Image (cartoon, helix red, strand yellow):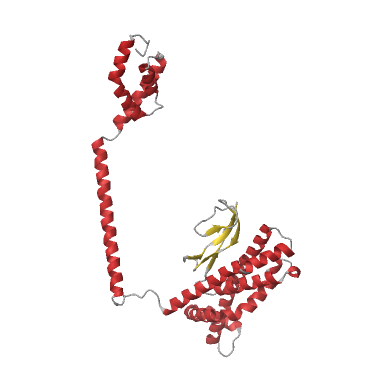
């Protein structure tokens, strides 16, 4: 019938009655766009089907049958699904056991039982308090001094918005560079001074000290470890005393690359002083806190940054850095980026 279209109308109708369920099954299995379905539908409607078209449809149909034969039997699929369900049940049992264990430990603590390992010592608590306090102060600079300096640059210097954002962020980046290098140099000087006073208490001449270090490297190494511990603690407690000198050093060595010193106004000066102070105090902690910013054209990291003003997927300019507890610690405040 499909090859030449012969046969009576009545026989076509009878065929459609008996074969239509098969066509519907094929339609469900192979979809509306199958050549097989197109040929069957045309044949059932009484249309003449070209022999080549019918042959192509038959080849496609045979290919589909091969795919069906190659699929796993239904009983295997059921077995696989049952295995997955059993696996999920085991995982749920394991998670329930963990939750019960944690709940029991919490209840023991609530009943007044002392845990074997306290979560934080007093020193660690003070350290965390200091870090959160510095993060709060740093973030408030963005809400106050940053906005005041931005308006001042915009109105007095006639800078465009992006120029203002770039220059204000350069203050943060230059402050980080300065403070990191200065903190390392300061610690080296403190350690050498402490070691020199111990090893050479009377003479104090650098040449003799250097020779002693070369002759007794083991003594030098052990002594430096002890000295570093106490020097670090001392510097953390006294870091604020260094702030005026660090600000002066920034003004002398970094300012000209950001703005002409003769054009520096009150709000920009206040912003710089506040940034340098807080970055220095963050850097002298042990370990130092971390300020993180993204580079231009990077994809915006939505875990660490909010998009400032304009929407987009890629960074045009970091407006304000994200603040972390330390280099591998958790984030305290998200930063801001201009996106493009």
Residue 213 place in picture, x, y as percent: 53, 80
Q: Residue at x 30, y 66 (%)?
A: 102
Q: How many marks?
A: 0
Counting from the top left corner in percent of width and height, residue 191 is at 54, 80
Q: Residue furthest bottom?
A: 202
Q: Nearer the viewer, residue 204 or 31?
A: 31
Q: What residue is rendered at 25% in x and 54% in y?
A: 90
Picture quarter containing residue 184?
Answer: bottom right
In the figure, is residue 96 to the left or right of 302?
A: left
**Is there any visible trace of residue 257 in the rendered image?**
no
| Residue 50, placed above or below residue 239 | above
Residue 167 locus on image (x, y percent): 67, 63
State whether residue 230 appears in this view.
yes
Whether 30 is drawn above or below 322: the answer is above
Quarter of the rendering containing residue 94? bottom left
Residue sticking out furthest to the right: 262
Q: Camera-side residue: 5 or 101?
A: 5
**Up-down: is 279 above or below 37?**
below
Q: Position of residue 66 (x, y in %)?
A: 32, 27
Q: Answer left or right for 65 relative to 256.
A: left
**In the figure, is residue 199 to the left or right of 111?**
right
| Quarter the N terminus occupies | top left
Q: Residue at x 57, y 90 (%)?
A: 202
Quarter occupied by residue 292: bottom right
39 lies left or right of 208: left
């Amino acid at each position: 019938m499909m090859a030449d279209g012969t046969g009576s109308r009545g026989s076509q109708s009878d065929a459609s009655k008996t074969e239509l369920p098969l066509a519907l099954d094929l339609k469900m299995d192979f979809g509306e766009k199958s050549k097989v379905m197109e040929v069957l539908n045309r044949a059932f409607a009484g249309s003449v089907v070209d022999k080549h078209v019918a042959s192509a449809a038959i080849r496609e149909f045979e290919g589909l049958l091969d795919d069906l034969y190659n699929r796993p039997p239904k009983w295997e699929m059921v077995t696989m699904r049952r295995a997955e369900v059993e696996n999920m049940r085991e995982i749920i049992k394991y998670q329930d056991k963990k939750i019960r264990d944690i709940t029991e430990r919490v209840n023991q603590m609530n009943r007044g039982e002392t845990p074997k390992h306290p979560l934080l010592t007093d020193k660690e608590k003070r350290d965390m308090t200091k870090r959160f306090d510095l993060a709060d102060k740093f973030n408030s600079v963005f809400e106050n001094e940053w906005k005041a300096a931005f308006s001042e640059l915009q109105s007095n210097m006639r800078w465009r918005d992006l120029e203002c954002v770039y220059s204000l962020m350069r203050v943060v980046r230059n402050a980080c560079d300065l403070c990191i290098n200065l903190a390392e140099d300061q610690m080296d000087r403190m350690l050498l001074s402490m070691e020199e006073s111990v090893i050479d208490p009377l003479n104090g001449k650098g040449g003799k000290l250097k020779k002693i270090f070369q002759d007794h490297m083991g003594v030098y190494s052990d002594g430096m470890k002890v000295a570093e511990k106490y020097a670090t603690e001392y510097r953390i407690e006294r870091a604020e005393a260094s702030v005026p000198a660090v600000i002066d050093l920034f003004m002398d060595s970094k300012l000209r690359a950001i703005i002409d010193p003769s054009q520096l106004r009150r709000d920009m000066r206040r912003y710089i002083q506040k940034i340098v102070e807080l970055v220095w105090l963050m850097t002298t902690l042990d370990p130092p806190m971390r300020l993180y910013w993204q580079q231009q054209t990077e994809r915006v990291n939505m875990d660490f940054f909010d998009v400032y003003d304009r929407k987009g997927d890629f960074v045009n300019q970091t407006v304000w850095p994200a603040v972390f507890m330390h280099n591998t610690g958790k984030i305290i405040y998200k930063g801001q980026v201009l996106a493009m």
